[in-house]
Amino acid sequence: MDPHGRLLLMAVHAHPDDETISMGGTLATYAAAHSSSTDTYVVTGTRGELGEIVIPERDTPEEHATLGEARMGEIAAAMAALGVTHFENLGFRDSGMVGDAGNDDPRSYHQHSTTDLDGTVERLVRIIRTVHPDVLATYDEFGGYGHPDHIAAARVTRRAWEVAGDPTWRPEAGSAWSPKKLYEVRTPDSQRDKVLKLLESRGIDSWWSEPKDATPEDLEKWRAWRAAMACPDALITTRIDISTKLAAKRRAIQAHATQIKHDSPLLLLSDQDMLDLGAMEQYRLIAHRLDHEPAQPESDLFAGLR
Ligand SMILES: [Zn+2]
């Protein structure tokens, strides 16, 4: 709970833009600008300095050299669109996609969390012990789609969940504080299939569309990867209705201009399409410290805490 008595959601992400794409509607719902009883705090592990630049005329060595700063500006604009007033960066270096040279950089989130997990976790625990979140939300252990920084964020958040409330764990990192619920944001199989069907009916390719001209071996690998990006519907515990936050989420997506093309499937679908698809962000409760099992399905990440 924050100093104003509001319940606090902390969203722990890898790069600027992940927070908006995966849970922008949820953040807009709980941000103080939209609620007097809840607030949000966004943490990103890196500044995303190894990301692509999707605007051709800006895809230059000079722009890449300062991409981290540019993306911090983009997340600031996205947070303004969502009404989120608190966000922080842990200061690790972007590791790049699986197999990139950046994976081996000792400053990278991936390397840091691999060689010194607790040292990495301490940066997040300091924030948790200062701002007192009631709920943590991050990725599943595959990091949504296998990116090393997303996997790092998932591991670091799970470890922080375990140790932040232990007064003997790194007491120099602040007084113990235990969040009460831990979530991973997920896409259930049925949602992926509905989105894919709609996009295909309009001839729009997405990262869920089967690659053409792939070898049978590559296609098999790709299918396993796509399967890992979603989960059985039965695992979903919590569905947040974002139907009134679609415009805010769209503005926040547009704010991440170097990362998301204006003709991305994320922007090509209209608000009506989103409503037809259910307009939901979905989560799996993976741990809690409530005195009773929460009733499911939930429609509120703070269910049981209010
Ligand atoms: Zn990311």
Image: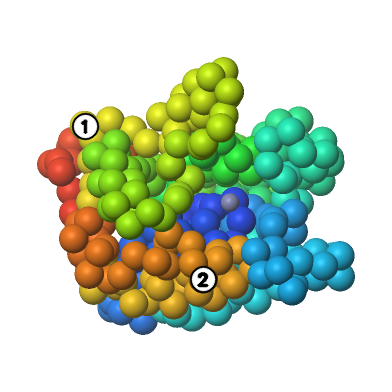
Residue 65 lies left or right of residue 159; in this view the side is right
> Residue 234's mark?
1
Query: How many numbered discs, if any?
Result: 2
Residue 288, percent across and down? Answer: 32, 39
Mark nearer the N terminus (2 vs 1): 1
Q: Quadrant of residue 29?
A: bottom left
Q: From the top left corner, tell me how far across and down residue 96 is, in percent.
A: 72, 45
Residue 103 lies in quadrant: top right
Residue 112 visible in the snapshot:
no
Q: Using residue 189 as the reference point, say whether residue 229 is left or right of it.
A: right
Answer whether residue 52 is visible to the viewer in this image: yes
Query: Quick one: quadrant of the N terminus?
Result: bottom left
- Does residue 297 sit above or below 214 in this rendering? below
Give the vertical position of 264 relative to 179 (above or below): below
Extreme residue toward the front, this view: 213
Q: Is mark 1 within 8 Å of ligand 1?
A: no
For label 2, the crowd category at 10 Å Cα-Cα, with few meaning under 14, some 14 to 19 and many 20 or more, is: some
Assess disc 1: are there few (<14), some (14-19) or many (≥20) residues with their C-alpha within 10 Å of its C-alpha.
few
Q: Quadrant of the C terminus?
A: bottom left
SS state under label 2: loop
Tag 1's secondary structure?
Answer: helix
Residue at (61% x, 56% y) in the render: 15
At x 69%, y 57%, the residue is 52
Residue occupying image coordinates x 20% and y 64%: 275
Number of the label disc, if any, that sits on residue 262: 2
- Residue placed at 20% from the left, 57% from the top? 278
Q: Nearer the viewer, mark 2 or mark 1?
A: 2
Q: Position of residue 262 (x, y in %)?
A: 51, 71
Quarter of the image where one finds residue 10: bottom left
Amino acid type, callout 2: His
Q: Nearer the viewer, residue 254 or 22?
A: 254
Gap in angstroms between the C-alphas marked 2 and 1: 34 Å
